[in-house]
Image (cartoon, grey):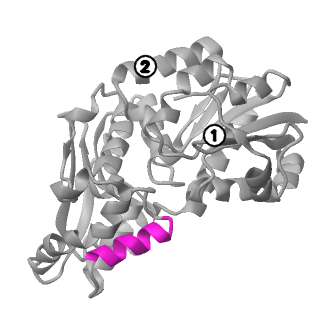
Amino acid sequence: MKNIHLYIFGIGNVGSTLIDQVLQSHTFFRQQHGIDLSIVGLANSKRVLLDLEGISKNWKDDFDNLSEAREADSFYKVSSLCDATKIAVDATASKEVAQCYPELLENNFNIVTANKIANSLSQDFYDLIRVLLIKKNLCFEYETNVGAGLPIVQSIHDLYSSGEQLFAVNGVFSGSLSYIFNRFSEEQIPFSEIVIDALKGGYTEPDPREDLSGNDVARKLLVLAREAGLKLEFDDIEIQNLVIPSLRTASLYQFLEEVKQLDPVLQEKKESLKEGEVLRHLGELDVLHKKLKVSLKAVKKERPAGQLKGSDGFFEIYSESYAANPLVIKGAGAGKAVTARGLLADIIKVSKASQEVLVFR
């Protein structure tokens, strides 16, 4: 039986769902995979809960009552006391946590992350992580960086690794914005109300501006571009920002209080649609010309992107083998349950590979 210790950053929508999924499936992992998966560390931005015996189903009460002030080395102090395989799981959208990845690797933590910031920081930082993975013989999995639980990153990685010439990747990259514009195109309610509903439903990032600004989709594009072998920076991406200038630097509280200011601009775009058109938020990666673009566009309803429902993501991959008819991947592209399940799938992948063979992308 292989002992795996999880140290989870982030106990919000995705993190708390992941914790419950791990606890519910503990017996299954032991019987099916020979893995004893225990969560021994939980952290939010200020507090940390540590238990080498593994947290219980009462973890929320324990975190409230037994957690301690978080220090920079809180996890490292405990991880050095046992010989289990260690996996740091990043269920945040924090730049601070992402910048700690090299330090985590130096302390012999494998990493599983839904946080796409590390893979979309500078090319130098991106390359440093890969150097450390080789040096330390550790694993790094991030399928949930793009498309929640959909196999987008792996598909691009496998095509490129096999020598396939990739041409383009286009589609609706954000399940959050898919949910928002699918509803906005069909329902006669203000744009701002749908944004608030999406936030409450766990579809958007904690700050919806991360989605509405186009930055979240841009990071996903950059993740895929680098999987396809391109060396590009975030500033190389053309991004249409849907947040009006006066709200871009406001506090989150102020933005949510004044989000109605977005309604006139978006309503005008909706009213300018021709018959049979809907609004869709699209990401476009032109691999051959090294161009990345994020924008809101009018799309014919009969087109694949125009037929999306709910929070579905939609991706078209064009390559040598898929030149005339693209490889299409479609499904739930947002939501705490599918994202958490995607993280858990990556955790099992690392658990089974750890200390046996080097696995990283």
Task: Tell me, yes or no, if residue 325 can be seen here.
Answer: no
Residue ID for mark 1: 89
Amino acid, disc 1? Val
Task: Identify the residue at image location x=75%, y=35%.
Answer: 352
Residue ID for mark 2: 127
Q: Start and end of the magenta stretch?
A: 191-202
Residue 288 among those drawn in magenta: no
Task: Identify the residue at image location x=71%, y=53%.
Answer: 19
Task: Identify the residue at image location x=37%, y=30%.
Answer: 121
62 left or right of 342 in image: right
Task: Tell me, yes or no, if residue 211 can be seen here.
Answer: yes
Q: Nearer the viewer, residue 351 or 115?
A: 115
Q: Nearer the viewer, mark 2 or mark 1?
A: 1
Q: Is residue 191 above or below residue 101?
A: below
| Residue 230, disc | none
Q: CA distance from mark 2 to mark 1?
A: 20 Å
Q: Residue furthest bottom?
A: 188
Indicate the position of residue 306 as horizontal and vertical percent values.
27, 72
**Helix, strand or loop for disc 1:** strand
Query: What secondary structure prevails in the magenta region?
Result: helix
**Helix, strand or loop for disc 2:** helix
130 left or right of 87 in image: left
Q: Nearer the viewer, residue 81 or 66?
A: 66
Q: Nearer the viewer, residue 170 or 192?
A: 192
Q: Nearer the viewer, residue 311 or 52?
A: 52
Q: Residues within 10 Å of mark 2 (few under 14, many from 20)?
A: few
Amino acid, disc 2? Asp
319 left or right of 149 in image: left
Could you tell which of marks 2 and 1 lies nearer the N-terminus? 1
Indicate the position of residue 315 as horizontal and vertical percent values.
36, 55
